[in-house]
């Protein structure tokens, strides 16, 4: 994706041209209708994102494209110049020196911005740098830094990576994907663009931060980088996607950050259109029915890239996450990382804690059935973990307790009343109203006597205080309890490792 030596700015398709001719070893160089550089009979790749129009977010598209967007505001212009000046590396060694110098200041948001700039300039050096120091740099390009980065995403210079699909693209999503593929992916021997994995989100519930809309593009990008570094997935055959169905105002995110109404918000500046589903939950209207935006996107992706392309749901609100997964899991190669991926990792960690507690145990899955679990928080990741423990490990539901903002979730015998918010919470509600259901977490621990407490509230950092730790240690007697803090970014965690070990005198398995 390098601009051709000697090419003139007037040849850029972003300025209206669809074809150019230059003298390069006496061969004709052209841009085809998809913006690909054509040299003789060979397609060499994309020309600096030349034809990225349809696949840009709404506000960026409306102003004329990436360059125009970054030039519109003095802050973006200055930041772009500063980052270009900081990012001079042409090798992995030089990139490591530059990013480590920035990280020495003690705050990684600038390091995140540097890495985005490095990707834009030299993608191969970017991945070489990540692979050289994954333990140091993955926390920069993904959690915990990516949370703050998404809250500030639109205030950073806009980069070309990432495909945006909005409500206005209904009926045209296939063309949007084709345009992005032509600009950013490589064709196979048959000329069809190759994409092995798409991570897509609507920005509705990022980490524990709430609705960030199109500013949440950092999450799909970061997740795909994680797959490249840890699993060897070819980054040039992946696509991060944001589905833009609108965005809530500042009240819709945890820290009350002005996102949708910020002058540099990149997406559609409108609220999400919602309705109450048959299950009684509030859902995004555009995702359901015969004109489903999600359905059209998934079918278009399968048509363009083939059925073998993995379509991964990421950070959808729980009320949408479960019904959408149920609707499409048997129709496409798809899964929901929050419901299934986080659950798999959490259960693996719980099995690991059993191994620490009982080193001689040979049946870790079977031993899960003898544990009592208290989940503090009832989002998609926790409910997914509960389903995995119940359906795959055979843990009785009488040993699975979960809280929401009202306390321990309960229901009547017939399920017509209770403190559940949706069908997924109702499935794991305790039968009968416990007297302590609205009491403190300490009261719940004293009465439930859990051997494993898993926190993923997202909005109550530090809620596992010393009283909670003392209660957990007390009810487990001589056994070592497990205490997991899964909320992120890090400043949303229920407890730190230091406090967990200090307050329990090293008893808890963290």
Image (tube, helix red, strand yellow):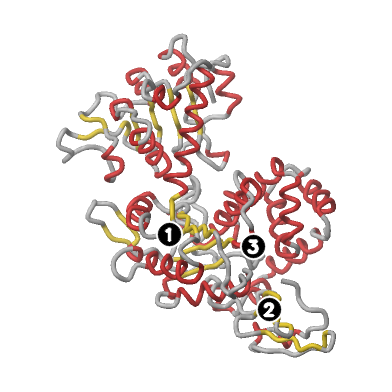
Q: Distance between the Cα atoms at labels 3 and 2?
A: 16 Å
- Vertical placement of 411 versus 117: above or below? above
For disc 2, the neighbor class at 10 Å (few under 14, some 14 to 19, many from 20) is some
Q: Quadrant of the N terminus?
A: bottom right
- For residue 386, side relative to residue 256 (left or right): left
| Residue 50 spot, x, y in % from top left | 66, 79
**Pointer 3 or 2: first along the chain:** 2
Q: Quadrant of the C terminus?
A: top right
Quadrant assignment, res 161? bottom right
- Are the residues tagged 1 and 3 within 8 Å (C-beta)? no
| Secondary structure type for disc 3 | helix
Question: Which residue, given by chain and number where applicable, does mark 1 sit on?
Answer: 248
**Residue drawn at (32%, 71%), measured in percent from left and top?**
291
- For residue 160, side relative to residue 460 (left or right): right
| Secondary structure type for disc 2 | strand
**Disc number placed over residue 236 in the picture, else none:** 3
- For residue 383, side relative to residue 504 (left or right): left
Mark toward the viewer: 1 or 2:
2
Quadrant assignment, res 372? top left
| Residue 403 spot, x, y in % from top left | 35, 34
- Vertical placement of 229 versus 52: above or below? above
- Are the residues tagged 1 and 2 within 8 Å (C-beta)? no
- For residue 510, side relative to residue 17 (left or right): left
For disc 1, the neighbor class at 10 Å (few under 14, some 14 to 19, many from 20) is many
**Pointer 1 or 3: first along the chain:** 3
- Vertical placement of 508 versus 208: above or below? above
Q: Distance between the Cα atoms at labels 1 and 3?
A: 33 Å
**Disc number placed over residue 43 in the picture, else none:** 2
| Front position in the image: 106 or 414 | 414
């Amino acid at each position: 994706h390098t601009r051709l030596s000697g090419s003139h700015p007037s040849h850029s398709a972003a300025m209206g041209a669809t074809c150019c001719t230059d003298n390069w070893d006496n061969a004709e160089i052209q841009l085809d209708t998809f913006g690909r550089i054509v040299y003789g009979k060979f397609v060499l790749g994309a020309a600096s994102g030349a034809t990225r129009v349809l696949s840009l977010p709404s506000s960026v598209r409306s102003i004329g494209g990436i360059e125009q967007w970054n030039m519109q505001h003095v802050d973006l212009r200055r930041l772009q110049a500063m980052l270009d000046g900081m990012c001079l590396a042409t090798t992995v060694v030089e990139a490591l020196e530059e990013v480590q110098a920035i990280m020495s200041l003690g705050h990684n948001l600038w390091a995140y911005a540097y890495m985005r700039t490095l990707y834009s300039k030299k993608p191969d050096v970017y991945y070489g740098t990540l692979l050289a120091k994954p333990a140091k740099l993955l926390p920069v390009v993904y959690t915990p830094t990516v949370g703050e980065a998404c809250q500030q995403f639109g205030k950073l210079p806009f980069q070309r990576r990432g495909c945006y699909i909005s409500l206005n693209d209904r009926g045209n999503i296939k063309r949007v994907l084709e345009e992005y593929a032509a600009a950013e992916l490589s064709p196979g021997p048959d000329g069809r663009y190759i994409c092995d994995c798409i991570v897509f989100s609507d920005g509705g519930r990022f980490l524990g931060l709430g609705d960030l809309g199109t500013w949440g593009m950092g999450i799909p990008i970061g997740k795909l980088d994680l797959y490249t570094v840890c699993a060897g997935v070819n980054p040039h055959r992946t696509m991060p996607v944001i589905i833009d169905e609108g965005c809530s105002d500042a009240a819709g995110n945890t820290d009350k950050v002005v996102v949708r109404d910020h002058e540099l918000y990149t997406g559609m500046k409108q609220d999400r259109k919602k309705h109450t589903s048959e299950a009684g939950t509030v859902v995004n209207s555009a995702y359901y029915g015969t004109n489903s935006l999600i359905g059209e996107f998934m079918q278009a992706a399968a048509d363009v890239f083939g059925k073998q392309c993995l379509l991964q749901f990421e950070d959808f609100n729980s009320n949408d996450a479960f019904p959408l997964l149920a609707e499409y899991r048997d129709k496409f190669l798809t899964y929901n990382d929050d419901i299934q991926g986080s659950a798999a990792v959490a259960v693996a960690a719980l099995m690991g804690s059993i191994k620490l507690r009982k080193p001689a145990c040979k049946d870790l899955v079977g031993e899960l059935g003898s544990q009592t679990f208290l989940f503090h928080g009832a989002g998609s990741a926790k409910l997914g973990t509960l389903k995995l423990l119940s359906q795959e490990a055979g843990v009785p539901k009488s040993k699975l307790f979960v809280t929401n903002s009202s306390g321990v979730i309960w229901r009547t015998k017939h399920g017509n009343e209770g403190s559940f918010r949706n069908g997924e919470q109702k499935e794991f509600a305790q039968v009968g109203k416990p007297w302590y259901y609205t009491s403190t977490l300490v009261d719940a621990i004293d009465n439930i006597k859990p051997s494993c407490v898993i926190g993923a509230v997202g909005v109550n950092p530090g809620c596992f205080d010393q009283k909670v730790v003392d209660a957990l240690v007390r009810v487990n007697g001589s056994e070592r309890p497990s205490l997991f803090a899964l909320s992120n970014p890090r400043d949303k965690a229920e407890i730190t490792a230091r406090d967990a070990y200090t307050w329990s005198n090293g008893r808890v398995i963290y």
